[in-house]
Image (spheres, coloured by chain):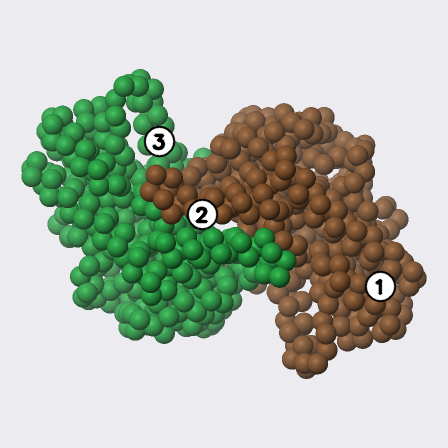
Chain colours: A brown, B green
């Protein structure tokens, strides 16, 4: 008499991006002659850096030769990659040792799995809007009784991000045991200052709460004053896990590589220093067998001096897209946020349209696919996310089509 | 007041293979002059097939060029790979459609994650001994109250596999909702016949139980009468999930690629046909972002006609190792099982030694590292696993060292 996990039925709808894909395919099949411009899912479009291609080609070749073939690696990642990541933190002035670094197949897996090392009755908080994975993984784990009022899941704490607070919420005033933070933020593009992050770290340490810090977009920060890692903030190693990714930094969305940091100093209310690091080690040893060794070789190359320079060129390219999108949409009278230190432009929908209404209007009138803000949470309603991950020509054509066809 | 997941403390000890690694490193550091022969962890040692190297090299090159670059793929896998897998099943006479196939980063992840789509109070059963991941992932999920008597976790049903039943247990007589089966078996090397598997499938359908069938070693079956997939058995699509791997078949232990099959017909006691397939889709969409696109290109090549032929040569090579190991150990008077349709030789320890005692004796006297049977469960106590995944020269030297130095 097997039974299914009942918590899946508490999830409201399909995962956001498959739903966008479904509506887009439907539009295309009804309008086979129309050109479609994709500015929706945050998917990279520029080729990999030459040094990364060279390193991964060599890695593949080595696997084809007896003397250099290798099989299972440590599930926490290869030593050269963990050293390169540790060095990256050193550049930022953070002391992160290799045994605090866990290489993974990407930030999505880590974002979804990290909740599993905490007790089920811990209270979860996040910025609203937020990357859906934080929310959905906790619903699946049974931490919510299901959807409640205002399109919010029960038992979760939503920290509203809006134009008034610059999309950076205040620290929670309710009880929150595990708080997800993402800066530069997906979807709003907002970035917390050092002072703002310090307030969160101080709050967490005062309340024995844990911060899950998603820094996947740190590579897009142009302002040197803004923190790129939570470990730049004093006291963060006691309360914060950081999740990072090669997806947007090095174009590894399809190659799959990321990492998490669980510091030795990190503590829960009921644990000693080192214990959470040990439990995450056990989780990864038991349920994961390491990222692809080819991807890891690519990761080492991406973090090398030449790799960093090459990847930076691509990041600059995307950020020029961001500037172009923001300027053009503002010229049409739309209220735009983000886009300066993040690859996302967060736009207030015109005329009070709901997010999915604007999605339908934008694809029908201009042939442009974007991401409805409400897909990221109730406070995203009435907003829309444009992504700068595209080729320039496509961005220019999309903006031209919006200018010419969108009836605002 | 964050708290850790309390279920981790119910796990008895570290994951088996890190523990072997720890003891091995300790021995090496105490005996720096001794030569070590590794016949422990089932890690492949032979280079990748040339056609796979060619395909993955091309995949890397394509990622370096704007026109052929690709980012996120479907989390369920690329279409060409799912078609190739579907065709593989067709060869076996099984109709498995692409929407029933979920490509992953390996059988370990799938083996660990699959339990999460079932209710927490489902009763879990497995063969004893078994791959530790089945057991540990369910302890972590809270399905056991902790270790009980006879080194067995409470609340789990252990189906004893021993020399008397040829290491193939009878169907459960107690209530079991989710049953893990692995054939060819890791660690015993036993393979169920069609009639034996049919009995399990009939039991599952009669009891609305689910079978998680780990077929990762099916590639080593030499006897054409033995089933390679559970879907060769009538009624299996209603009750069985199959987990498969490129690790041992194509040497992808480090490259990372596998798949699971969740048939549309599969039902729990409280679900309709299609529902489990949909829930697993939702799980993978939410918590995973697809296997590396480079690995997937390699997988397509491995499943091609030439790839299959090349991979078969390597499998034959390992199976010759298996024969050599089995024959040599039998010549020393040891009782050996498996090794004919599986890459593992399961050996009764001499003189009633406990498994870890034999581990220490074998490394100290002969410098050979194997795997203690008790690491796979209480019924593995008094047994020892030798792996055929090694280069011939190393196997021969290890066997020579055993012959010359092991005091039986």
Q: Give the number of the mark in front: 3 or 2.
A: 2
Q: What element carries label 3?
A: helix
Mark 3 to mark 2: distance in Å? 26 Å
Q: In the rendering, at what x and y percent does residue B36 appear?
A: 26, 28
Are discs 1 and 3 located on one and the same chain?
Answer: no
Q: Output the chain of dot 1.
A: A
Are discs 3 and 2 located on one and the same chain?
Answer: no
- Tell me, for residue B21, which label it has, or none: 3
Give the residue drawn at x 64%, y 74%. Answer: A25
Which residue is denoted by mark 1 in the rendering?
A: A349
Q: In which quarter of the image is the N terminus of chain B?
A: top right
Who is closer to the viewer here, B384 or B98? B98
Q: Output the chain of dot 3.
A: B
Residue B211, picture quadrant: bottom left
Q: In the rendering, at what x and y percent does residue A297 appear?
A: 51, 41
Give the residue drawn at x 23%, y 44%. Answer: B388
Give the residue drawn at x 86%, y 51%. Answer: A163
Q: Residues within 10 Å of mark 3 (few under 14, many from 20)?
A: some
Q: In the rendering, at what x and y percent does residue A84 appear?
A: 57, 32
Determine whether label 1 and label 3 are within 8 Å by CB.
no
Asked if residue B3 can be seen in this view, the reply is no
Q: Give the number of the mark in front: 2 or 1.
A: 2
- Tell me, for residue A60, which label it has, or none: 2
Q: Is mark 2 on a helix, strand or loop?
A: helix
């Amino acid at each position: 008499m097997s039974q299914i996990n009942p918590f899946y039925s508490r999830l409201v709808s399909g995962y956001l991006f498959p739903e966008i894909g479904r509506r887009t395919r439907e539009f295309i099949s009804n309008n086979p002659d129309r050109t479609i411009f994709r500015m929706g899912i945050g998917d990279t479009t520029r080729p990999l850096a030459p040094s990364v291609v060279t390193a991964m080609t060599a890695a593949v070749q080595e696997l084809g030769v007896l003397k250099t073939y290798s099989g299972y690696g440590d599930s926490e990642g290869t030593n050269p990659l963990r050293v390169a990541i540790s060095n990256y933190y050193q550049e930022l002035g953070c002391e992160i040792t290799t045994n605090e670094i866990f290489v993974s197949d990407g930030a999505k897996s880590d974002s979804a799995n990290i909740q599993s090392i905490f007790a089920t009755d811990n209270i979860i908080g996040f910025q609203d809007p937020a990357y859906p994975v934080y929310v959905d993984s906790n619903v699946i784990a049974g931490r919510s009784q299901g959807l409640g009022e205002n399109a919010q899941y029960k038992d979760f704490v939503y920290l509203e991000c809006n134009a008034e607070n610059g999309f950076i919420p205040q620290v929670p005033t309710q009880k929150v045991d595990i708080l997800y933070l993402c800066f530069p933020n997906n979807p709003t593009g907002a970035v917390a200052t050092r002072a703002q992050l310090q307030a969160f770290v101080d709050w967490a340490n005062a309340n024995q709460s844990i911060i899950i810090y998603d820094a996947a977009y740190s590579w897009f920060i142009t302002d040197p004053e803004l923190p790129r890692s939570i470990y730049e903030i004093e006291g963060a190693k006691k309360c914060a896990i950081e999740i990072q990714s090669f997806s947007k930094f090095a174009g590894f969305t399809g190659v799959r590589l990321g990492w998490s940091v669980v510091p030795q100093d990190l503590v829960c209310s009921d644990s000693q220093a080192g214990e959470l690091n040990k439990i995450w080690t056990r989780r990864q040893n038991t349920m994961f067998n390491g990222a692809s060794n080819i991807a890891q070789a690519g990761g080492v190359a991406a973090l090398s001096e030449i790799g960093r320079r090459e990847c930076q060129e691509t990041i600059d390219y995307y950020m020029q897209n961001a500037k172009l999108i923001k300027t053009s949409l503002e010229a049409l009278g739309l209220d735009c946020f983000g886009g300066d230190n993040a690859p996302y432009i967060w736009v207030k929908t015109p005329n009070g349209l709901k997010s999915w209404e604007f999605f339908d209007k934008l694809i029908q009138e201009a042939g442009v696919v974007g991401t409805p803000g409400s897909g990221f949470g109730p406070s995203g309603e009435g907003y829309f996310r444009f992504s700068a991950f595209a080729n320039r020509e496509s961005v220019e054509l999309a903006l031209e089509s919006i200018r010419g066809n969108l009836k605002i």
